[in-house]
Image: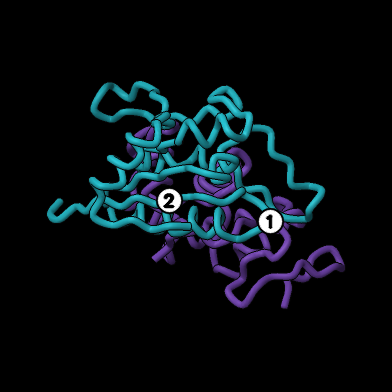
Amino acid sequence: MGYMFNGAEAEHDEEGYLTDLGQWTPELALLIAQAENLEMTDERWEVVNFLRDYYEEYQVAPAIRVLTKALSKSMGPEKGNSEYLYELFPYGPAKQACKIAGLPKPTGCI
Amino acid sequence: MADVRRFLYINRKAPYGTIYALESLEVVLIGAAFEQDVSLAFLDDGVFQLAKGQDTSGIGMKGFSAIYRALGDYGVTKLYVETDSLATRGLTLDDLQAITFEDENDGYTEKPSIIPVNKAEMAKVMAEQDVVLSF
């Protein structure tokens, strides 16, 4: 299974998460978002980029509670709350946004 | 929050080479979602889990040492390190990563998460727990 991209295939698991994080590019993110029926607006990019930065620093995809807290701290409470995030990513911000960001499924995702 | 229980995860093995350290971390991260009082203890070779400057590129395994620095975000703010175990292995507290948390009850001041304890203090910490899990 994989996303067809630039004539090559980026492998993903049965849920659509990239198997090799190193294959991620912004263009591939657009493709994953398309598979999730999401258009990549600036607001969605903001969350996706935030997740990638968090992963880069801590090597872990944050659980939703951690994500809202961290977002709230860096971008303000109007963005760091689960209502706003669920509006952007209706199937679960941590799950959907992490998938688009090319990260593994968050640990502690229940 | 009713019925908060005290969980202590004891780590006794070196971080890489076996799966224990990573499994322990994953359980801690999952457990943290349930808003319990979670703390970690590091003794014997487990103290190596917090050592700085680890590089896993030679063994083809994902490095997860940075995750310890995210524990504060998960509300896990007490990492007890047994000092005799450090000394036996030629380590000092300076050889460990700086791990901090922001204290919500104190204006989000950054405070160290690592708490050095001797053997007797570690025994006391263990005795105070409701649940002790050993890795």
Q: Is A76 positioned to the left or the right of A43 in the image?
A: left
In the image, residue A35 above or below residue B10: below
Q: How many numbered discs sit on the rendered protein? A: 2
In the image, residue B14 above or below residue B81: below
| Residue type, mark 2 in image | Ile
What is the chain identity of the residue bearing mark 2? B
Give the x, y percent position of residue B22.
56, 55
Of residues B40 and A90, the one drawn nearer to the viewer in this rendering: B40
Q: Quadrant for residue A22, please give it.
A: bottom right
- Which secondary structure lies at badge 1? loop
Mark 2 is surrounded, within 10 Å at the Cα level, by few (under 14), some (14 to 19) or many (20 or more) other residues, namely many
What is the chain identity of the residue bearing mark 1? B
Badge 1 vs badge 2, beta-carbon distance below 8 Å? no
Q: Which residue is drawn at 45% across and 36% down?
A: B82
Res A105 seen here: yes
Q: Residue under circle 1? A: B17
- Residue lying at the far left of the rendered structure: B2
Q: Quadrant for residue A70, please give it.
A: top left
Rendered image: mark on residue A105: none
Chain B's colour is cyan
| Residue type, mark 1 in image | Gly
Q: Residue under circle 2? A: B10
- Which secondary structure lies at badge 2? strand
Q: Residue at x 72, y 55 (%)?
A: B61
